[in-house]
Image: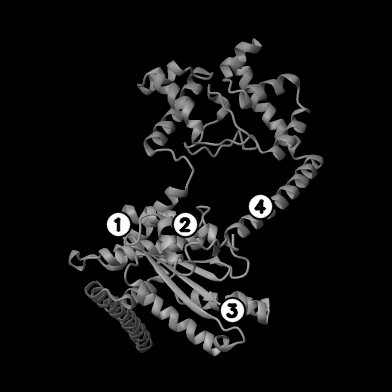
Amino acid sequence: MSSSYGKKAMIEGNSQSLDLANSSLRGTRSDVDEEMLQVLMEYRRTGRVELQERVVGHYTNLVESIARRFSGAAEPFEDLVQEGYIGLLSAIDLYDSSKNVKFPTYATHFIMGQIKHHLRDRGKIIKEPAWRQEKNQRITRVVDLLTQQLGTTPTNQQIATEMGMSEDEVVEHLSTREIFRVTSIDGSMDSDDDNGDTVDIERMDVGVSFQLPVEDKVVLDSAMGQLKNLEQRVINDFYFNDMTQTEIAKQLGISCNYVSHILRNSTKKLKKILSNEELKDARQRVNILQRKLDEQKNFIEQNVIVDPLTRFYNRRYFDSRLEEELTRASRHRYEIALLFIRIEGLRDFSRSIGTQKGDEVLLRTAHALRHAVRKVDIVTRYDKDMFGIIMPYTGEKASIVQERLSSLLHNLFVEQKWNVARCPIAPEFSIALYPRDGLEGSTLLTKATSHFYPPDAKRKSLVA
């Protein structure tokens, strides 16, 4: 009895300790959230940049965690994070605590919205509307039911009668559904895992056309040569010539059921043939060549937009991204600052002391800049001796950023004794603001870079 009582007391004691620990943790989080809210309110009142940066820094994990949800969207993770920070800045500027909505909840909406908007701008995939998906699923079920009842493929009129639709509507749905679905000839044609979202293409009286990559076409042509002539003709007409099963049957003088039978059996044969070792080797050789081409393409693309020394984006990316940012700023009505940093005397410095020392200057400067700007800012190597920074949501306060970077680089140059070298160097700064100094990218660039170069100087960028 006493033993049982002792165990019960120990369990209750552990439970109370756990509750106290959880309560303490909730209190800590609540205190941090309350502190951030106070910082946010102070920023809204004073507009001090360091307060804004403190809030952004606190919610870095939130931005990155949301960006990871879209990591399968074929966009660089860094770009998604950058768009997320733009959404976070919007939330900071628009948040109203009187609405009784927690800031992380409010910010999540803006961060996700900004990333989705970016993907919509960049994306080229046609998405099927939900109402069309539902209608296609109904058509699929009706076709299955009628096929079982009639023992043959139903006509468009029979489908329309069962669906309560006009025949033209059925034809329109059947013809457009292929726009939203890509069917591979390697795909399983007799799978039992039909969830209502896919349709057995052999049983639909709809023409289907698609294009294969060159390497797959070579392998497929070799496999097709091992089929009977009739099987080759039916597959070519159905998959490549946009002919329906009904049209193929009329042309060959055979029944639709026989056409469906040929398609079903011949595709099964193709799958077996394509699994042969000889064709596997051919596909493997082609894939190796394709991988090499893809690697070369990726290498070229990387070097087209990235400076190989500093790993910053280069001038080409700067110019294209500037136009995007200006379009977005015009739409959402916010300011943008362009900040340029030129290392005065770098060319003479490199010529006198050596290009390796000149590269060291650029690398150390790039490292300092990378850790001194916001993650939402876009830093580039704009020219051989110049860096350019696009700073969204930054107007007159860009001068504060300039002062901070000027002090940082001045200390770096003094520490390395570059300012007293045989050919001394020093950082120079220039700012242009949108929309104050111009509405076009070319106008802003002229305004900013004219500080470094005389108007009549013909200077060509050495960084693509």
Q: Which mark is residue 297?
A: 4
Q: Which residue is mark 1?
A: 333
- The picture places residue 260, in percent across and down from the top left corner, at 61, 22
**Residue 270 image point, x, y percent:** 71, 32
Q: CA distance from mark 4 to mark 3?
A: 31 Å
Residue reaching furthest to the right: 278
- The first of marks 2 and 1 along the sequence is 2
Q: Residue at x 33, y 54 (%)?
A: 330
In this orientation, which residue lies closer to the viewer: 106 or 298? 298
Q: Quadrant of the N terminus?
A: bottom left
Asked if residue 70 can be seen in this view, the reply is no
- Measure how far apart labels 1 and 3 are at the Cα level: 38 Å
Q: Secondary structure at mark 1?
A: loop
**Which sits earlier in the primary sequence, circle 1 or circle 4?**
4
Q: Residues within 10 Å of mark 1 (few under 14, many from 20)?
A: few
Q: Position of residue 203 (x, y in %)?
A: 55, 25
Of callouts 4 and 3, the N-terminal one: 4
Pointer 2: residues within 10 angstroms few (<14), some, or many (20+)? some
Q: Is residue 435 left or right of residue 250?
A: left
Q: Is residue 31 left or right of residue 146?
A: left
Position of 159 relative to 96 (above/below):
above
* Distance from the alpha carbon under mark 2 to that under mark 1: 17 Å
According to the image, label 3 marks what residue? 361
**Callout in the foreground (2, 3):** 3
User: SS at mark 2?
Assistant: helix
Above/below status of 8 relative to 71: below
Please give the name of the residue rendered at 43% of the width and 20% of the height, measured from the top-left corner.
Answer: 159
Q: Amino acid at mark 3?
A: Val
**Residue found 67% across the figure and 51% down from its top:** 294
